[in-house]
Amino acid sequence: MVTEYETEGWFSRIADSIKGIFGGLAIFFLAMPIIFWNECRAVDRAQDLEFGLGSVVTAKADKVDSGNEGKLVHVVGDIKVNETLNDKTFGISANGLALDRKVEMYQWKQNVDETSKKKAGGKKVKKKEYSYEQVWSSTLLDSSKYKDAKYKNSNPGTMPYKSESTNAKNASLGAYKLTSSTMSGLGQSEQLEITKDDLKGMPANVQKTAKLEDGGVYLGNDPLKPQIGDIRITFSVRKPTTATVIGGQYGQELKAFTHKKLNDPLVLTTNGSKTPAEMFQDAQDSNTMLTWGIRLVTFLMMFGGLAAVFKPLSVIADLIPFIGSIVGTATSIIAFLISAPVWLLCVAAAWIVARPLVGILLLVGAGLLIGGLVFAAITFNKKRQESPA
């Protein structure tokens, strides 16, 4: 383990915090267009799902009904794939919707544990502890910048093989042909068990060190005692299953449905059998989760941006460490009290464009929140002035 100490002077911290003001403002204002985009996207998606639920018709999988041409159809059936997928590098083949190769290499990983402590005079001492462990990783870990000389450049410079997927181009759901948009995510993943015969079909340079291990291929001396640079490879195939697809019927194909009343092409897929109502409810739930996830991110952007703007105040106060902590807490509260109503105003503005009634209600709520904060501040200041010295 290597331990580093880094002392940052007060003037240096002041300079960095002042620079951070510009970054904080950029993040704060960047959140605004993202909020607007997210709310409009959420409304558009909800409208599309509402239109889709009212338009979808259920069709039988065993026969393409020409009367449904150009319509949004709901089809449940068994997927069939008449295509052999090949991994050209290792000569592995399988029938399915996708053939996936996962490659991992045994490497040294550097972990960093960082703590900091404020000192008198506004200084800050950072302590970094670097520790190392051996792990299997599907990405190359660059060891050229590791702090401990013992582990520096300890990992190979490249991975000899990479993970990749081969997807089927031809699949059907009963009598319907599936396209890339309607095949995505369908199928049940199963690991392929690699055999000795499979090893014989691999390239000569692979066969030299290849061994069977847990249904996969191990490139190294001993799977029980892995060495840095050893490789393990597993293959899996997404097997056809019963599936439900809601998409546009165009000839014999099921693909993304387009309509002048839709904001975006519409297609829904899932494994198993589900009714149209269940499919659209799942899609709406996903839309809600995504919307709130982005809302949380944008609020944190605004809050974090304002916190960076106020950061110089706490750094100045760090001349006396405990005073700096108090000021830091106070500026965080102020950043929250400002960012919350501003964020709500931005959401309200977006909804006024998308759905005016909801937007107006949100705008009223934001106004009440801001008014309440202003009233509380005025009341507090008045009481402070009236209190005896």
Image (tube, rainbow, N blue to C red):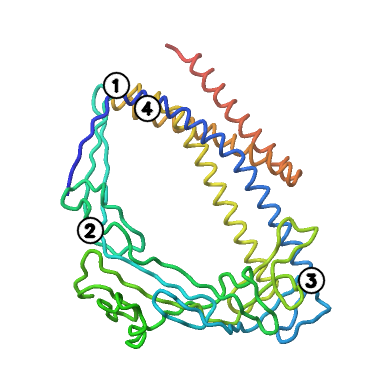
User: Disc 3 designates what residue?
Assistant: 71
Q: Distance between the residues labelled 4 and 1?
A: 16 Å
Earlier in the chain: of badge 4 and badge 1, it is: 4
Nearer-the-camera pick, 375 or 74 = 74
Q: What residue type is labelled 4?
A: Asp
Q: What residue type is labelled 1?
A: Leu
Toward the front, the furthest residue is: 204
User: Disc 1 designates what residue?
Assistant: 319
Q: Which amino acid does label 3 sit on?
A: Lys
In percent of width and height, residue 23 lies at 47, 32
Q: Is residue 125 rendered to the left or right of residue 389?
A: left
Residue drawn at 70 percent across, 84 percent down: 175
Q: How far apart are marks 2 and 1 (CA)?
A: 39 Å
Earlier in the chain: of badge 3 and badge 1, it is: 3
User: Disc 2 designates what residue?
Assistant: 133
Earlier in the chain: of badge 2 and badge 1, it is: 2
Mark 4 element type: helix
Q: What residue type is labelled 2?
A: Glu
Earlier in the chain: of badge 2 and badge 4, it is: 4
> Alpha-carbon neighbours of circle 3 within 10 Å: few (<14), some, or many (≥20)?
some
Residue drawn at 75 percent across, 80 percent down: 59
In percent of width and height, residue 104 lies at 33, 67
